[in-house]
Amino acid sequence: MAGTNSSEIRVAGSGRLFVAAAGTAVPAAFTADSTADWTGGGWKDLGFTSADGVTFAKKDKLEPVDSWQAVSPVHFVYSDRDLTLKFALLQFNEDTLPFFMGGGEVKTEGVPASDVYRYDIGDRAYPDVRALGLEFTDVKAGTPTAVKYRFAIPYGQVTASDDIKLARKSAAQLGITFTAMSRGDGQALASFVMKDNTYSAAV
């Protein structure tokens, strides 16, 4: 809706991140159990993230077309598009560590009862294409239902990993930048699915 409307302001009060096999679709059903909506589709909850939440970035690169007749560009050509999510995971487990490191798996080391596990970092990097999902909830006072937003990148991979700081006064974090990859043929790079009646005017 055009004009000023405070009900359309969104605050990501709480949220979660999920990872799944490449090509997994974002769940469109919004039931009372949001976790079941995701995990029923094969998504895995990545757990706690830092209080900074998630930074969403879309950067388009345009190349100007100059001409002899004008000092300003007469046209622009899109040459690049980067769509990324940046966040820091706080939990270390069999899902988060390989995701951060770029693939592989955690294996049992020795006798299973010993609770000793091993994760090997390869001597070279291999593509580790995944689907990444995000959900956040905005609860406003005086409203009967919460507004929920879901965002998913069906094909992408970790393109940058922050340094892991091990210190006495702070939790270790797995800082990740996840970048969307094109599937070609005009398919969506990513998708939003919203439980938000402010969009009803567009239907």
Image (cartoon, rainbow, N blue to C red):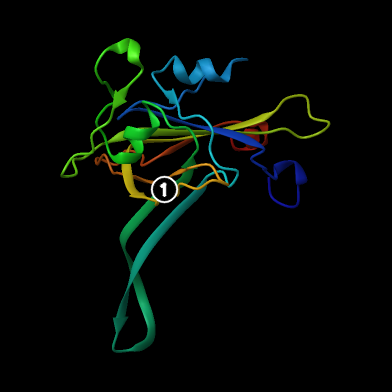
Neighbour tally class for label 1: few under 14, some 14-19, many 20 plus, Cα within 10 Å: few
Task: Assign a secondary structure to mark 1.
Answer: loop
Name the foreground residue: 9 vs 53.
53
Residue 26, position as x, y percentages in the image = 44, 27
Left/right placement of residue 136 relative to residue 144 reads: left
Q: Is residue 190 left or right of residue 65?
A: right
Residue 23's quadrant in the figure?
top left
Q: Nearer the viewer, residue 165 or 50?
A: 165
Q: In this figure, which residue is indicated by the disc labeled 1?
A: 164
Name the quarter where the C terminus is drawn.
Answer: top right
Above or below 33: residue 92: below
Give residue 89's position: percent from left, percent from top.
47, 38
Q: Can I make out residue 30 in this image?
A: no
Image quarter hosting the N terminus: top right
Is there any visible trace of residue 20 in the rendered image?
yes
Q: Total marks drawn? A: 1
Considering every residue shown, the one lying at the far left of the view is 123
Residue at position x 19%, y 39% in the image: 122
> Which percent across, then down, holds residue 159?
32, 49
Looking at the picture, does residue 113 appear above or below residue 25? Answer: above
Amino acid, disc 1: Ile
Residue 12 sits above or below residue 74 on the image: above
- Can you tell which quarter of the image residue 19 is in? top left
- From the viewer's perspective, is 147 left or right of 172? right
- At x 36%, y 87%, the residue is 70
* Residue furthest to the top: 113
Instruction: Tell me the quarter of the picture where residue 93 sits.
Output: top left
Residue 52, given in percent of the width and then of the height, sits at 58, 47
Q: Is residue 201 above or below residue 69?
A: above
